[in-house]
Amino acid sequence: MNDIYTFLADLCVHNNREWFDTNRDKYKNAKDKFENIIEYLISEVATFDSSVSGLNHKDCIFRIFRDTRFSNDKTPYKTNFGGFIVPGGKKCAQAGYYIHIEPDNSFVAGGIYMPPAPQLLAIRQAIFTNIDEFRNIIEEPIFHKNFGGLQGESLKSIPRGFAKDFPYADLLKFKSYNVWIKKEDEDILNPNFLTNVVELFKQMKEFNDFLNKAINVSY
């Protein structure tokens, strides 16, 4: 992890094509090591979630090159390595397991980010219909201790079509259904970091299962 962190820390300071081209060997070294990490995590997740069996790192890792065509920020590169371990690969609208390595902004996350409208509605309906089951998952003591509940942008009012007096209306307002835990730089440089990531992913499985069942994903 040291080579990955060092490269990204330098990239944060020198986010331009000239520096990147000069240090392309360091990029390739860091990229190769992150690919190895994702391959390891896929194999570990597959031991408790068979839906990710058969994936490889190419299915999961996001490109470091930014699309700047419609952005005011013209810096050419992301300053992170990210991998989303999810059945069907990173572009599919399913819940999965995400790792994000970035100086001062690393985190481990699970769930589904900004799903299309049909999937989002299906998730909300599943929560509404199975509220006790969903609450048992997100309020389980270890899960809640690590992730603290759902996180992200939400609507100001309950979505159309749901009873306004539903006692857990806040759980229906989210635009994404994610949980995450921040990791400090010293955490990601700790030799036990990946062991910790696998344990966190295990704790997310029931949460991901609920979401994927809601959007009719077959395991």
Image: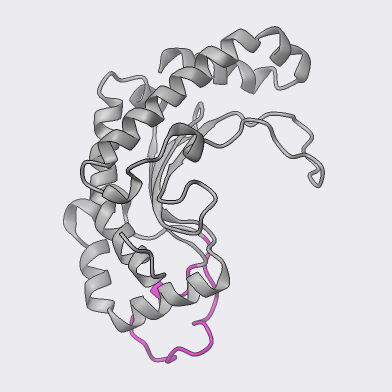
Query: What is the quadrant of the C terminus in the image?
Result: bottom left
Does any portion of residue 132 appear in the rendered image?
Answer: yes
Query: What is the quadrant of the N terminus in the image?
Result: top left
Report x, y in % for residue 60: 48, 39
Q: Is residue 19 left or right of residue 104?
A: right
Q: Is residue 94 left or right of residue 54?
A: right
Q: Nearer the viewer, residue 49 or 199?
A: 49
Magenta: main secondary structure equals loop
**Is residue 6 within the magenta segment?**
no
**Residue at (38% x, 26% y) in the render:** 37
Q: Nearer the viewer, residue 75 or 145?
A: 75
- Quarter where residue 66 is shown: top right
Task: State whether residue 47 is above or below residue 10.
Answer: below
Report x, y in % for residue 12: 63, 23
Report x, y in % for residue 160: 53, 87
Q: Is residue 172 left or right of residue 131?
A: right
**Is residue 159 within the magenta segment?**
yes
Q: Is residue 119 left or right of residue 171?
A: right
Does any portion of residue 169 appear in the rendered image?
Answer: no
Magenta extent: 153-174
**Residue at (31% x, 83% y) in the render:** 129
Report x, y in % for residue 61: 51, 35
